[in-house]
Amino acid sequence: MVITCDKQQLQDALALVGRAVSTRTNTPILECVLLTATPDEGFTLIGNDKEMCIETAMIPAEIDEAGSIALDAKLFTEIVRRTTGESIVIETDGKYNAVCKSGRSRFQISGQPADEFPTVPENELNAATARYGISAGGLRDMIRQTIFSVSLDQSKPILTGEKFQIKNNILEIVAIDMFRISYCSRELGEDAPESEAVIPSKALNELSRILPDSDDDVVNFFFTENRAVFETEGFRLISSLLQGDFIRYDQIYNEDFSTMVVANRIQLLNAFERAVLVAVENRMLPIKMDIQDDDLTITAQSDRGHVEDGVPCETEGKDLTIYFNPKYFIDVLRAINDERVAIRFNTVLSPCTIRGADDERGFRYLIVPLRPPA
């Protein structure tokens, strides 16, 4: 194989696929990226840790001789980053050695056979019948507004991912960690077949980081029996799926309330962030919320000190005193874009729900309270 390519394009591509390269493995091939050069087209790079795979689109290059090789991702990336030329020439021989030349620099590194690198069979991906499209910015926002509620408890693997469900031409994304639920939805357009899958949070976190910023860019996605696939003009991300029965979240939300608060989101977020300033390091203290007479008072106490804060609000229903983990409220209020939020409560031990006050479509959150101190 002999190729000549632009250094910056190669460096950007390595940074992209490097997100899927395994860093802790006893299998050396998983520490590699696969470089494949195609005559008259260019080359692609692939990183694959067997749970997540990222492939670049075709990168333009001068191909003097086609071929493929697996190269140590960390070493190859460092070589490309430190070279000073604007272009790089990569040559391989029959013994899986690669020579990288740029400017006056010349590196020779040992590679591995391309056929030992794990790839996803194209026939499996081509077998998918239901395919969907959504704006890149829209999908990125949906992930950002829900991913923080994914469970970290490995004893319930199904909850360490997010559920994607398509029904009635709407994409719903849900994350649950037994103490809170985050839900977001967006219309896909007409004729979107019903489907569902649970995708690991690691893959979704990486996807949200590499998606284009523009809403004009489209992400096409689909599910196979064992994988989720997301495609843009620049890359394809393939993730394994989590198997098992996801919690029936739609039966948990309750729109009834005995107390409702409508408040400015930023004012409320700032009050919560001030309240946790007295939290003991590595331990989040419970906060008390007192709701009465169009006023919400937030109180927190620890060995470090005491804080009382609050915000004006519109209240409906009974006065209420209730306790929460403030981190859960901070996560939600940071994720929402709406100017005002509506919070519905029932009893001191019942979950509260949070939605936009002026537009309740699109997202909703549920948070379980803490027991009042004895």
Image (cartoon, rainbow, N blue to C red):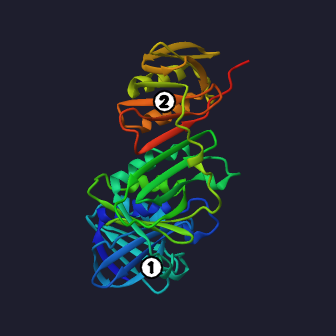
Looking at the image, which is closer to me, 285 or 42?
285
State if disc 1 and disc 2 touch (CB < 8 Å).
no
Q: Name the spot of residue 293 as percent of width and height, x first.
A: 47, 12
In the image, residue 126 sits, relative to residue 326, either above or below, namely: below
Can you identify the residue that label 2 sits on?
A: 343
Q: Nearer the viewer, residue 303 or 351?
A: 351
Percent from the top left, x then y, of residue 121?
Answer: 50, 79
Quarter placement of the C terminus: top right
Residue 83 visible here: no
**The disc labelled 2 sits on which kind of residue?**
Ile
Q: Residues within 10 Å of mark 2 (few under 14, many from 20)?
A: some
The N terminus: image quadrant: bottom left
Residue type pointed to by label 1: Asn
Of circles 2 and 1, the one toward us is: 2
Find residue 368 and report its image quarter: top right
Q: Considering the numbered disc 1 on the image, is that residue within a helix, a strand or a loop?
A: helix
Which residue of the protein is positioned furthest toward the right in this rendering?
374
User: Relative to residue 148, is residue 139 depicted above or below?
Assistant: below
Side (left or right) of 349 relative to 130: right
Which image quadrant for residue 41? bottom left
Q: Is residue 179 left or right of residue 10?
A: right
Which residue is painted at 51% across and 75% down in the image?
120
C-alpha gap between disc 2 and disc 1: 45 Å
User: Of the numbered discs in the image, which one, if any, rests on residue 126?
Assistant: 1
State the residue at coordinates (59%, 69%).
28
Q: Is residue 7 left or right of residue 318?
A: left
Residue at the image point whose x is 39% and y is 27% from the top: 266
Local packing at callout 1 (Cα closer than 10 Å; few below 14, some 14-19, many 20+) is few
Which residue is depicted at the point 44% across and 15% down?
294
Dot placed on the residue nearer the N-terminal end, 2 or 1: 1
Question: Where residue 306 appears, x then y in whole percent?
Answer: 58, 12
Q: Is residue 304 left or right of residue 314?
A: right
